[in-house]
Image (cartoon, helix red, strand yellow):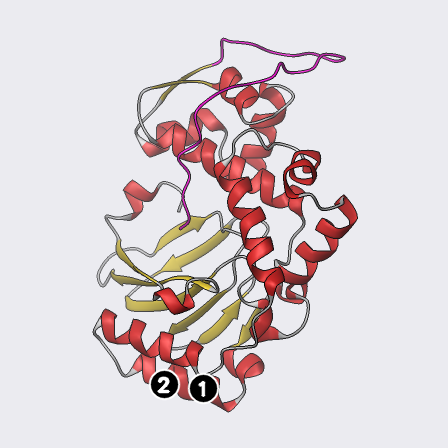
Amino acid sequence: MLERQAGEQWFRLSRRPAAPDLADLVEHCWTVRWDLRGRDPYPQHVLTHPSVHVVVERDRSEVVGVVTGRFTRVLEGRGRAFGIKFRPAGFHPFLGSPVAALTNRMLAISDVFGPDGGTYARRIESLEDESQMADAAEAFVRSRLPAPDPVVAAINGVVARIMQDREITRVAHVVDRSGMTERRLQRLFAEYVGVNPKWVIRRYRLHEAAERLAAGGEVDLAALAVELGYFDQAHFAKDFRAIVGRPPAGYARAAGAATVRSTGPSFGSGSRAPGRRHPPGTARAR
C-alpha cells in the first residue's frame, strides 16, 4: 500500500495467516474497513504482489488477477472488503487454466466458481466478525481443494526467493538459482502466476524502494538505484514515477518520512554497476 501511514487515517486493515493445511496455496485473509461518511472520498493506491485475490464487498464479489500497473481503490461512505490472498502459484489449481488469463482483469466470483461462489459471497456478507469470515473463507477453499501439484510449491519457492534475495535483479539470476531454463521459467510463470519473472523482479524492487523511502532517515537515490539493480538513478526514477505516480523524492515527501539526496555512484553509457553486497530488503507480502 503506497503512503500507507497516511492511508491508515482513513481505513483499518487486518490480516489472518492461512491455516497450516492451506498455507501452500493461501497466504492470508484480509479485511479493510472504512467509514468516510461526511468526508471526501479517499483514493488508496496499491502496488500489487504477484497474487490472485478473491474479494467480497457489499455490492460486488470478484476474483482479481495480478494488476501490472498501479491499482487505485477509491474509498467512500462506509464499507468493508474481505479478501483471500492466494500465494503466487496458489490459485492455478483452482482455476485449472493459465492464470495469465486473469492478469489485469476482475471476474465475477460466480464466473470462476459457479453458483458456489455466490453462496460463499452471501455467507461472507452476512458476517461481521473477522475471525468468522476467515473461517468461512478457509472452509470454502477446503471444499474445493484440488489434487496436489508439485509445480505450485516450486514456483512459490522461486517467487519467495526473488522477494527475499535482493541480489536477484535479472532473470538470468533466477535461472542460475532455480536450475530451470529461462524458457521453462517463462512458461510456468505465465501458466501459474500470470506475469513473467522480469515483472516479478521489478515489482519487488519497487516495493523495496517504496518501503525504504517511507521508512524515515536519509536515502541516497543513486546508491539505492544501484542496490536495486538499476543501470543508474535516472532509469530507477523513470520506472518509479511511471508505476508509483510520483518521483522518488516526491513520494518520500508525501510519505513524510525519508530525506533524499542524489549524490552517490552513477553509471553512464558503457558502464556496469559493480557487484553488490547488502542486507536483504524489508519488503514483505501485503
Specify few, some or many for label 1: CA neighbours under 10 Å numbering under 14, 14-19, or 20 or more. some
Q: On the image, numbered disc 1 is attached to which residue?
A: 118
Side of 263 relative to 185 (left or right) = left
Quarter of the image where one finds residue 198 = top right
Report the amino acid beneath label 1: Gly
Side of 137 relative to 186 (left or right) = left
Side of 126 relative to 66 (left or right) = left
Q: How far across and down, in percent of the image, does residue 96 sit?
A: 64, 75
Report the amino acid beneath label 2: Arg
Residue appearing at x 65%, y 53% in the figure: 195
Q: Give the magenta part as a residue range.
A: 262-286
Quarter of the image where one finds residue 38 = bottom left
Query: Which one is in front, 62 or 202?
Result: 202
Residue appearing at x 35%, y 32% in the figure: 214
Please tell me whether mark 1 sits on a helix, a strand or a loop: helix
Q: Is residue 34 above or below residue 186?
A: below
Counting the numbered discs, the total is 2
Callouts 1 and 2 close, C-beta under 8 Å: yes
Asked if residue 236 lies in the magenta stretch, the reply is no
Q: How far across and down, in percent of the image, does residue 4 sit?
A: 33, 44
Residue 122 disc label:
2
Please tell me whether mark 2 sits on a helix, a strand or a loop: helix
Side of 75 relative to 180 (left or right) = left
Q: CA distance from mark 1 to mark 2?
A: 6 Å
Q: How far across and down, in percent of the image, does residue 284 sit?
A: 40, 43
Residue appearing at x 69%, y 57% in the figure: 188
Q: Is residue 4 above or below residue 276?
A: below
Asked if residue 275 lies in the magenta stretch, the reply is yes
Q: How far across and down, in percent of the image, does residue 193 sit?
A: 61, 58
